[in-house]
Image: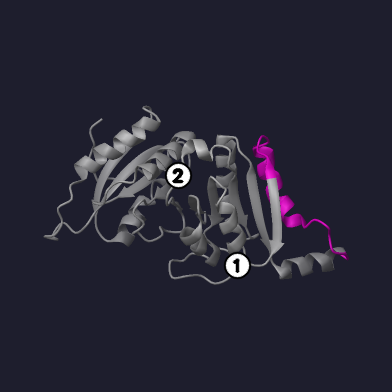
Amino acid sequence: MKPELSTDLITSEWSADGAVVVCIDGSPLRPGVITWAAEFAHRHSLWMRIVFVAPNPCDPNTSASPTGLFMEAIQIAESVSPDLRIRTDLISGENTAILTALTAEAALIVNPQGDLAAPGPTCSFAKVGTPRESIAAAALPVVVGLDGSAHSESALAIAFKEADAVNTELVVVHAASPEAELRRDFASGHAPQHPTPLTWQLSGWATLYPGVAIRQIEFDGPSEAILEQLSTEARLLVVGRRGRGSFDDAGLGTTSSAMIRKAQCPVIVASEA
């Protein structure tokens, strides 16, 4: 398959027509990251879009050619599945503008080089780091961090889909705010032994994915430490883009910002949609 260089966009949503977008540049490819993205696309019936993010073409120091990198990336992706639909694109411009364009068709954006900022709030993105070998990760659980906010729902959707696709356990980590606990205690007249909002949130997804075994971990307080610990024995960590607390300059919540820096497994930051 020869790479097709183009800059036109195909609009699609998180569905069988969506794309796992992998951004590369003139740096050497990281085969493990390309493989991870291709496997994710294959599992979820998505197509794969490999984008060479070119620096300013007027820069006299620019000498990297995308053709060889495209061919190498395609070969890696096709080793996962020869039936995987792959498209290549060469895009130049400012990082924010590039990400805005890519989110129009992306189900998930993967940036192996780590030098692009977080995409817009309507697109999920992955920080893969150094992925574990597929065989080693096969029996490991998917971990999802929840805090009861609206952003948790998108994280749950991705986590359940992935756990179901790979037939593994889903570990649900829930940080309940003290204010929420007090309101529940007051309304019920007693302190419930098992907080109910998480159960309500999970029930619909558990019905959709009855084959997924669920393990719940609930606690009060910041979730960064426990999520980082669980990531050492997880195949994937999923968090919402924003939750309670302060926000950093990239528009991410404190937990998601911490996890893309510290997690020991691939991390998906779910979109706000």
Mark 2 and mark 1 in contact? Answer it, CB < 8 Å.
no
Q: Which residues are magenta?
A: 189-214
State the quadrant of the N terminus. top left
Task: Name the image quarter holding residue 145.
Answer: bottom right
Residue hosting label 2? 13
Q: With 134 as the anchor, is 175 left or right in this view?
A: right
Mark 1, secondary structure of its residue: loop
Mark 2 closeness class: few <14, some 14–19, many ≥20 residues within 10 Å: some
Residue 231 percent coordinates (x, y)? 55, 52
Mark before the other along the chain sequence, 2 or 1: 2
Indicate how the structure is coloured in the image. Answer: one colour
The one of 137 and 5 positioned closer to us in this rendering? 137
The one of 198 and 69 positioned closer to us in this rendering? 69
Residue 189 percent coordinates (x, y)? 88, 66
Residue 202 percent coordinates (x, y)? 69, 48
Say what amino acid the circle numbered 1 marks. Answer: Arg
Q: Residue at x 13, y 59 (%)?
A: 61
- The answer to whether any part of residue 214 appears in the image is yes
Was residue 191 drawn as part of the magenta stretch in this picture? yes
Say what amino acid the circle numbered 2 marks. Answer: Glu
Estimate the spatial distance between the alpha carbons at disc 2 and disc 1, rounded to whole Å.
27 Å
Q: With 231 as the anchor, is 208 left or right in this view?
A: right
Task: Name the image quarter holding residue 82.
Answer: top left
Q: With 60 as the anchor, is 2 left or right in this view?
A: right
Was residue 262 drawn as part of the magenta stretch in this picture? no
Q: With 16 as the anchor, is 229 left or right in this view?
A: right
Residue hosting label 1? 244
Q: Residue at x 53, y 45 (%)?
A: 235
The one of 178 and 133 positioned closer to us in this rendering? 133
Residue 142 vertical position relative to residue 192 in the rendered view, above or below? above
Q: Residue at x 60, y 35 (%)?
A: 167
